[in-house]
Image (cartoon, rainbow, N blue to C red):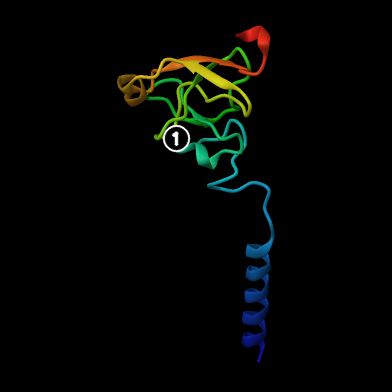
Amino acid sequence: MALPLRLLLTTLLITLALAAPSERGLIFNLDTGELCLQSVQCKSGCCQRDTGLSLARCTPKAAETQDCSRKSLYGVYYKCPCESGLTCDADWSIVGSITNTDYGVCYDKNDPTTL
């Protein structure tokens, strides 16, 4: 009789633990500075590495006047894309998009002082 009760209690505890909402995940919803493989894993939306051999970490998106990359299919950047509302003024080329070297600077296209 004690075994089914323990089994029921264990099952209930596991169910509650899995159903509890978590602010931070092990794979997704990662904070700035945590290791990542793709930008979709990061709260900021940018998984960045310094060199081809370095580990990628979640990094905030580029602010106005900071270096940036255009959106990439790879999901890992050497320079993060711009924050929402900003545009990355970078040359676009096939070679640059393949090698992830088409860098630019973030600017607000609605700000008349930056035109």
Is 35 on the left-hand or right-hand side of 72? right
Locate residue 102, reporting x and y percent.
41, 18
| Residue under the point 30% across and 20% down | 95
| Residue under the point 43% across and 31% down | 72
In the picture as drawn, the residue positioned furthest to the left comes out as 95
Give above or below for 96 relative to 72: above
Of residue 6 and residue 15, the one placed in the foreground of this image is: 15
Q: Amino acid at mark 1?
A: Gly
Q: Which quadrant is home to the C terminus?
A: top right
Of residue 67 and residue 89, the one placed in the foreground of this image is: 89
Of residue 27 and residue 66, the one placed in the foreground of this image is: 66
Locate residue 48, reporting x and y percent.
49, 27
Mark 1 surroundings within 10 Å by alpha-carbon count, few (fewer than 14), some (14 through 19), many (20 or more): some
Locate residue 24, reporting x and y percent.
64, 46
Locate residue 113, reporting x and y percent.
67, 7
| Residue under the point 66% across and 64% down | 19
Give the labeled residue for mark 1. Answer: 75
Is 2 on the left-hand or right-hand side of 49? right
Q: Which quadrant is home to the N terminus?
A: bottom right
Give above or below for 114 relative to 5: above
Q: Quadrant of residue 110?
A: top right
Is 80 on the left-hand or right-hand side of 63? left
| Residue under the point 53% across and 42% down | 41
